Amino acid sequence: MILGQLVAPIKRDLGISDTSIGLLAGFYFAIFYTMLGFPMGMIADRYSRRNLIAVGVFFWSLMTAVSSLATSFFSLGFARMGVGVGEATLGPSAFSMISDYFPKERLGGALSVYAMGIFIGSGLTMIAGGTVVSTVADMPPVTLPLIGTIAAWRLIFLIVGLPGLLVAFLVFTIREPIRRSLLRTSEGQVSRLTFQDIVGQLALRKRSVIGVSLGLATQALCNYAIIIWISPYFQRVHNSRQAILVLGILILTAGIIGMYCGGRLCDYWLQRGIYEAPLKVGVLSTVGAGVFFGLSMNMPDLTLLLILMAPAQFFLAMPVGSSYAALQMIFPNQLRGFVSALLLFTINLGLLTGTFLPGYLNDRLFRDGNMVGYSLTLTVVLASFLSATFFRTSYRSYRKHFEQMQGLDQK
């Protein structure tokens, strides 16, 4: 997240374009995050999910710190790949563990609390990160033991990355839950699925998987586009770092409230037999996000822009936790890590496009970096309504697959 705050000094020192920034934020991270998600998911389905997370946190924190040593586009890209390798462990393991901690009628709320980390992290980046960046920007080069003299902005990657090495050890305080909702043989033994079995189970639920995955991917496209490009927008168009601070507060407050409300609304509908509840939350939220973000970015007055950004952030946050829960609810335990990796794979399509497209539109369509607001608006509004379409067209198939899974749970 901090990369979006450092666009200006990185471009200056490494001599790269907005398009390159988009690749560093998206592609160079996502390619390994995506490629390794599937084997990490299969490991999570068989071995200790807690231990896998601990190793991942340690490694991605280390590679974040290594970013401070980058001297070129490609060396920073290598560090970004390393962050992706570490983060590939988290989603499949966490989704599977939380699904074993909570019953289905509370899972939307539980995974929404988990997903609040996204908005806590990005909000704190804009609040504390903006303050740190503005302070460090005027500092002379810094001399560090073992590393030597480096530009002050590189220090921020160390500040962000090194504490994570200690946080990794906190993961060992988490209890590994007993696995529930397992496929079993006719003799009552737990089934050990082959890759062919996994493919077969996915094929049985393909319409629901496609709808949920693409719906969340296009919603994630909006979030990632905003996270990376809203700071350059405020700096270039409004020349305001204070606006970044205000937006960070909005993300922390409206984002967390939206996440909580989305999860609770999903649980409320599920308890009343509306089994497509996660998808209904997706439709409501993505339409609301597209409308309010589009209105916000068309306000010439910065105060009005930020006022309208509050409901935009609320709706942007609403569907994340319930969408995470959606696929966990319709698959047996032996596939939850793998199907989580599949979901994260499609989310990365949104990551790749959301981080890349606004910068590309700046360079190729508008040919003006100060048009970033138009590039961002075009990206987010179109993606929001596309997301709503994917969620809405999957209602019937998802309800059927949810009911089938209920039958398995009762055996």
Image (cartoon, grey):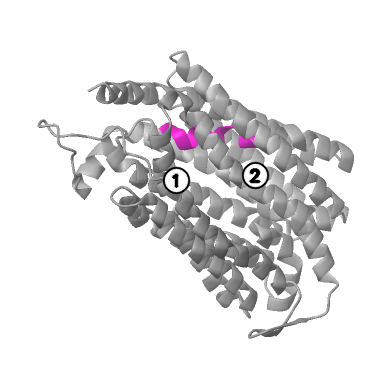
In the image, farthest residue toward the left:
187
In the image, farthest residue toward the front:
173
Q: Residue 372 carries which label?
A: none
Task: Tell me where residue 113 sits by quadrant.
Answer: top right
Q: Earlier in the sequence, mark 1 or mark 2?
A: 1
Q: Report whether residue 290 is seen.
A: no
Q: Which of 209 and 242 is in front in this view?
A: 242
Residue 401: percent from left, percent from top: 33, 26
Q: Based on the picture, tell me whether residue 316 belongs to the magenta stretch.
A: yes
Q: Which residue is drawn at 66% across and 62% down?
A: 3
Residue 174: percent from left, percent from top: 46, 47
Q: Based on the picture, tell me whether residue 157 belongs to the magenta stretch.
A: no
Q: Mark 1 points at which residue?
A: 94
Q: Is residue 260 above or below residue 334?
A: above
Q: How crowded is mark 2: few (under 14 residues within 10 Å), some or many (20 or more)?
A: many
Could you say whether the residue bearing mark 1 is in a helix, strand or loop?
helix
Q: Which residue is drawn at 88% across and 39% down?
A: 303
Q: Residues within 10 Å of mark 1 (few under 14, many from 20)?
A: many
Q: Give the range drawn in magenta.
A: 315-326
Residue 31: percent from left, percent from top: 46, 61
Q: Is residue 176 above or below residue 24?
A: above
Q: Mark 2 points at which residue?
A: 119
Amino acid of disc 2? Phe
Query: Between tags 1 and 2, which lies in front?
Result: 1
Task: Tell me where residue 282 sits by quadrant.
Answer: top right
Q: Residue at x 22, y 23 (%)?
A: 411
Dominant SS of magenta comes to helix
